[in-house]
Image (tube, rainbow, N blue to C red):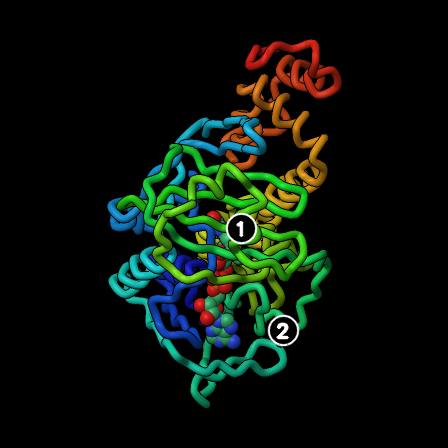
């Protein structure tokens, strides 16, 4: 029994069906469900959708991207994926495709459903107890399953606000752009059919979307006159963690199992990888295996989120960092590889690190764009 039919709950349902389990998903909303999201899938997320048999249906409705570009005040640094490509896909379209695949796989889905959770691991659906071997909480950041089953939350640091809006303007880059400012960031994801998704993040909740975009003059210029194709929608961002994700018969997955700050662009990709690991573990009747795999997935993502937000906190420091990354493109590519799981931290090329550190500490000795 899976509580929450968002993208990760559906991915888990499909993965479990592929392992021969009987699966029911219940969600309180009606599909297809739209949710504020940057709508960028990292290469490992695309690979997981491949493994779930969903990607071939999603691909025609997606736009590829090949890396990440950091930008501020005319300064740029480009990092390219080492293997695979990312994809921008409208959230509502992704949800539709996941539902179709889940339905074809034989998942029972209940929408607009009221799920009541007793203490421990019992679930009632529309007043009836659901007999289930496993109860999976895929019910998002504010998970009721997590609360009802008594999982301890170990970290809930400052929450950030995330707002997103779509615009009818063809993507001007084949990279996802991250624009930086002391007060927050803006992320541009390419979508198909001449559209982009813009998400704006504020370190403190409150500001309006237009005010946030004005913090990034280059982006503001590009969006001037572009026709919005959706309303502004907002959600909470920021990282959170739980001390364990498996407790007796109850398991947590996706944002319910601890979220990473949306600036990493990894929430969906992490969730899809967790779904595959969860199905493997439950097919082997070994929830501890899922716990171990989960820990491995989120460790690097949390570390990256902390690094990005700390490194991006001060303008002077960001400028140095952008220049140093711009001068060390191979290192930036490698770091992106670590971020997406395509490269190992222990193999970081030492020569490139030395060059990067030299640029960071004494930028005036290096010519624009030259490799150390
Ligand atoms: C502004 C913003 C931008 C982002 N950008 C990106 C990005 O570019 N790439 C990326 O990978 N990630 C991004 N993320 C993160 C990503 O959106 C989340 O990680 C992802 O939505 C998690 O999916 P989920 O299925 O775990 O949870 P959700 O999408 O939150 O789904 C949970 C589901 O559970 C249901 N539910 C909740 N409570 C109950 C209940 N009691 N009973 C029944 N159903 C219930 C809800 O209706 C919902 O359908 C972004 C997040 C934000 C806020």
For residue 20, side relative to residue 153 (left or right)? left
Per the image, the residue denoted by label 2 is: 149
Q: Which residue is at the front of the view, 246 or 95?
A: 95
Could you tell me which secondary element the residue under label 2 belongs to? Answer: loop
Label 2 crowd bin: few (<14), some (14–19), many (20+), radius 10 Å: many
Determine the residue positioned at 55% across, 81% down: 117
- Disc 1 and disc 2: Cα gap in Å? 34 Å
Determine the residue positioned at 61% across, 10% down: 367
| Mark in front: 1 vs 2 | 1
Q: Where the C terminus falls, by quadrant?
A: top right
Q: Are marks 1 and 2 in contact (CB under 8 Å)?
A: no
Q: Exactly how many numbered labels are in the figure?
A: 2
Q: Is residue 365 visible?
A: yes
Label 1 crowd bin: few (<14), some (14–19), many (20+), radius 10 Å: many
Determine the residue positioned at 50% across, 44% down: 187
The image quarter containing residue 159 is bottom right
Up the image or down, 37 lies above or below 138; here it is above
Within 8 Å of ligand 1, the CB of disc 2?
no
Q: Where the N terminus falls, by quadrant?
A: bottom left
Q: Position of residue 125 (x, y in %)?
A: 44, 83
Q: Which residue is at the front of the view, 97 or 191?
A: 191
Q: Is residue 3 visible?
A: no
The image quarter containing residue 145 is bottom right
Up the image or down, 87 lies above or below 204; here it is above
Q: Position of residue 90 (x, y in %)?
A: 35, 53
Could you tell me which secondary element the residue under label 1 belongs to? Answer: strand
Q: Which residue is at the front of the view, 69 or 16?
A: 69
Per the image, the residue denoted by label 1 is: 200
Q: Which residue is at the front of the view, 197 or 243?
A: 197
């Amino acid at each position: 029994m899976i509580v929450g039919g968002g993208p990760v709950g559906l991915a888990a349902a499909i993965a479990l069906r592929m392992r021969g389990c009987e699966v029911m998903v219940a969600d309180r909303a009606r599909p297809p469900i739209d949710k504020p999201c940057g709508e960028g899938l990292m290469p490992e997320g695309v690979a997981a959708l491949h493994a779930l048999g969903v990607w071939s249906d999603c691909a025609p409705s997606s736009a590829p991207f090949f890396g990440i570009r950091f930008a501020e005040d005319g300064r740029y640094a480009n990092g390219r994926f080492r293997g695979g490509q990312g994809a921008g896909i409208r959230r509502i379209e992704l949800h539709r495709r996941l539902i179709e695949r889940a339905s074809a796989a034989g998942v029972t889905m209940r929408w607009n459903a009221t799920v009541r959770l007793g203490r421990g691991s019992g679930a009632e659906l529309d007043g009836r107890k659901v007999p289930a071997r496993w109860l999976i909480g895929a019910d998002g950041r504010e998970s009721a399953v997590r609360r009802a089953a008594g999982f301890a939350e170990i970290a809930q640091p400052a929450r950030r606000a995330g707002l997103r809006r779509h615009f009818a303007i063809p993507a001007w880059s084949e990279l996802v752009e991250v624009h930086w400012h002391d007060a927050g960031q803006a992320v541009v994801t390419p979508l198909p059919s001449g559209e982009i998704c813009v998400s704006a993040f504020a370190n403190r909740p409150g500001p309006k979307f237009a005010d946030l975009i004005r913090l990034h003059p280059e982006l503001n210029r590009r969006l001037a006159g572009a026709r919005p194709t959706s309303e502004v929608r907002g959600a909470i961002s920021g990282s959170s963690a739980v001390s364990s994700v498996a407790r007796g018969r109850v398991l947590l997955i996706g944002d319910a199992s601890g979220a990473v700050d949306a600036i990493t662009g990894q929430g969906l990709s992490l969730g899809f990888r967790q779904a595959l690991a969860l199905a493997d573990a439950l097919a082997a009747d070994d929830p501890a295996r899922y716990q171990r795999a989960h820990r491995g997935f989120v460790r690097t993502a949390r570390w990256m989120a902390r690094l990005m937000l700390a490194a991006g906190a001060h303008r002077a420091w960001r400028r140095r960092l952008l220049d140093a990354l711009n001068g060390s493109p191979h290192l930036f590519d490698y770091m992106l590889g670590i971020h997406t799981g395509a490269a190992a931290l222990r193999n970081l090329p030492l020569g490139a690190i030395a060059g990067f550190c030299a640029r960071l500490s004494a930028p005036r000795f290096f010519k624009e764009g030259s490799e150390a």
